[in-house]
Image (tube, grey):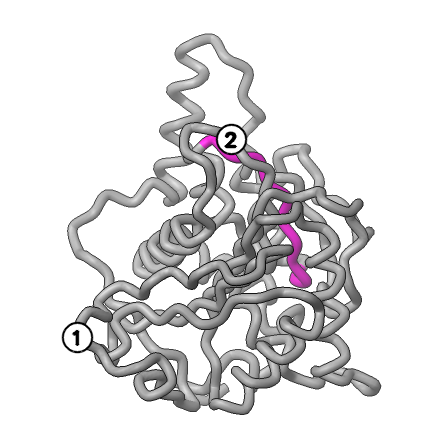
């Protein structure tokens, strides 16, 4: 596969994120830093009640990097992903959310008002592809957004960090989201920076006239429409260096050893911990 090509141009997500790619993704220190940073910002944009645990949905949860941030903040969560290999790695890492193998383009099957919010990191652009015969991106996006809208409590938010390839993708995504009942729009952090720019779709469920959060680093910026640029490659997000990373394999082992010393029950160290991901619902 050519270096620098967007992953969604190389193969469907369940194929691209095979066992090797899933493990590489989850063991890359820089990738972990980026995912944690993006997750923290998405949660901030949810504007959840302070000091109160929420029940959240993580779309495209992958190996659980974003979900671990939710857990650390005291929230309970459900994770959906289309890649079996990614979910297998999440199981091995003993993430604390409920995991489901599912293609969200087929719609969601949760009870109305189930979730207090939804986040998604680096996944939404995959729904713009027609990876199989009969796939219609507009119909799949509408089915996803309409079922998500039903699944969320009124007044809650869904925040998607994503990598749009061009203005047409942004229009396709936002049109289907608004058609499904959401309000909201784009929030762009550091729009004038090539490396630090981050694009979020912030959606409101059952809220009319709620003001979009302001993007970071936008005090002296042009409008969002003028400052969002697109590329055939994924943009690299600049992250601070020197931070301790809690998501590594060594950190997980140390955490389990510490719990054993405290006399707490810990799953055995093995390739599969005994906790199985759940099948498609």
Residue 62 visible in the displayed image:
no
Res 197 seen here = yes
Work out whether residue 87 or residue 113 is closer to the camera in this orientation and state it: 113
Taking depth in this image into account, of 45 and 13 the one nearest to the observer is 45
State the SS at label 1: loop
Label 2 sits on residue: 53
Query: CA separation, marks 1 and 2?
Result: 35 Å
Q: Give percent across and percent down for residue 48.
A: 47, 42
Describe residue 215's horizontal placement relative to residue 113 as left or right.
left
Q: Residue at x 30, y 60 (%)?
A: 30
- Is residue 81 found left or right of 39 in the rendered image? right
Q: Is residue 81 magenta?
A: yes
Q: Earlier in the sequence, mark 1 or mark 2?
A: 2
* Residue range highlighted in magenta: 74-83
- The vertical placement of 171 against 178, above or below, is below
Residue sitting at 44 percent across and 25 percent down? 256
Tell me: residue 47, above or below residue 82: above
**Does the magenta segment cover residue 116?**
no
Q: Which residue is mark 1?
A: 220
Residue 1 is situated, as x and y percent measured from the top left of the image, at: 50, 86
- Horizontal relation, residue 4 to residue 183: left or right: left
In this view, the residue in front, 79 or 178, is 178
Residue 120 at x, y percent in the picture: 53, 59
Residue 264 placed where, x, y %?
Answer: 50, 12
Count residues near mark 2 (Cα–Cα under 10 Å), then give few for <14, some for 14-19, many for 20+: some
């Amino acid at each position: 596969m050519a270096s620098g090509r967007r992953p969604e141009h190389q193969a469907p997500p369940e194929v691209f994120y095979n066992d090797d790619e899933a493990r590489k993704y989850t063991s890359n220190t820089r990738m972990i830093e980026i995912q944690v940073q993006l997750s923290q910002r998405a949660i901030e944009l949810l504007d959840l009640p302070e000091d109160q645990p929420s029940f959240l949905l993580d779309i495209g949860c992958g190996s659980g990097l974003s979900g671990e941030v939710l857990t650390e903040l005291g929230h309970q969560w459900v994770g959906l992903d289309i890649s079996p290999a990614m979910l297998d790695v999440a199981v091995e890492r003993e993430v604390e959310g409920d995991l489901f193998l599912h293609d969200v383009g087929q719609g969601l099957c949760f009870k109305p008002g189930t979730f207090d919010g939804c986040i998604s990191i680096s996944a939404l652009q995959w729904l713009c592809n027609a990876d199989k015969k009969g796939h219609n991106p507009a119909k799949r996006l509408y089915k996803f957004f309409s079922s998500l809208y039903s699944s969320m409590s009124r007044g809650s938010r869904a925040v998607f960090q994503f990598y749009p390839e061009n203005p047409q993708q942004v229009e396709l995504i936002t049109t289907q989201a608004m058609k499904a009942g959401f309000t909201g729009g784009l929030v762009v952090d550091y729009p004038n920076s090539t490396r630090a720019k981050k694009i979020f779709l912030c959606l409101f469920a059952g809220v009319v006239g709620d003001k979009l959060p302001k993007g970071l680093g936008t005090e002296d910026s042009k409008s969002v429409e003028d400052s969002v640029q697109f590329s055939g490659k994924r943009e690299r997000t600049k992250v601070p260096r020197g931070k301790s990373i809690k998501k590594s394999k060594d950190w997980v082992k140390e955490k389990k050893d510490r719990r054993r010393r405290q006399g707490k029950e810990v799953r055995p160290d093995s390739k599969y911990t005994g906790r199985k991901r759940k099948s498609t619902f």
